[in-house]
Amino acid sequence: MGAFARTLLPGHRGRFDGRVGAPPADWYLAAVRIAVLASGSGTLLEAILDDGIPVELVLVDRPSRAMEVAEAHGVAAELVARASFGPDFDRAAYTEQVADVLDEAGIDLIVMAGFGTVFAEPIHDRFPNRILNTHPALLPAFKGWHAVRDALEAGVDVTGCTIHVATLEVDAGPVLAQEPVPVLPDDEASCLQGAIKAGGRRLYPAT
């Protein structure tokens, strides 16, 4: 595996495998093999799974609570660990590693849920228009890593969360859904971030 560690964690796949008789009401979801990519607390992943959306694989780039969430829901989790978070990080090689894992799992749709690594071109070539992401602002406003801080500094009355198709250009893909969040006069970054995350936990599964 070279510079990247890959670990398959306990879980099971094929949530609808072996069912007989009439298909479930959400049979069409079972036909789409979804991978959720996460890095942190796994709250978005939890919202997706609690909503009953079948997830084939959870992939993480570092040890995190998201792995525990996957295990609790009986979903396979795989750690493809980054060897570096510094300037020597080989983004293209790591992207190829992740794309290989997703290809091997037969994934159709990639759902980024707080994944902390920005991918290079190879994954977009192999999964064109099949990567979703969430952003803590009403795109195209406040792109980038500091969207909440930027919204506060700009003095806007409303910001929100956006679900969009991820493209090679960060935060520039087609918008699928948005939910506005009012900015209160006494809001600090942490409070506003919490309100936006709460909106995202509702909006992402629905989208």
Image (cartoon, grey):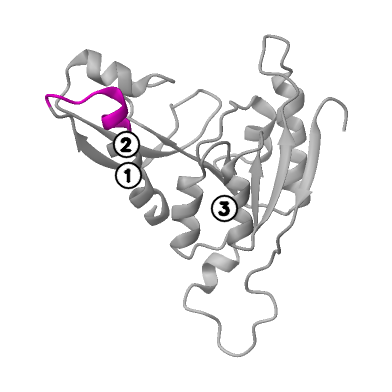
Which residue is under mark 3?
69
**Quick check: marks 2 and 1 in contact, CB under 8 Å?**
yes
Q: Residue at 57% x, 53% y: name it.
A: 69
Residue 34 visible? The answer is no
| In-image side of 33 versus 191 (left or right) | right
Quadrant, the N terminus: top right
Check disc 3 and give the amino acid type: Val
Front residue of 21/155: it is: 155
| Mark found first going from the N terminus, 2 or 3 | 3
| Mark found first going from the N terminus, 1 or 3 | 3
Q: Residue at 73% x, 37% y: name it.
A: 80
Q: Residue at 30% x, 16% y: name it.
A: 150
Check disc 1 and give the amino acid type: Ala
Look at the picture and state if 189 lies above or below 47.
above
Rendered location of residue 38, percent (x, y) = 57, 40
Rendered location of residue 73, percent (x, y) = 58, 62
Q: Residues within 10 Å of mark 3 (few under 14, many from 20)?
A: some
Which quadrant of the structure image shows residue 164?
top left
Check disc 2 and give the amino acid type: Gly
Residue 198 - label: 1
Q: Secondary structure at mark 3?
A: helix
Q: Residues within 10 Å of mark 1 (few under 14, many from 20)?
A: some
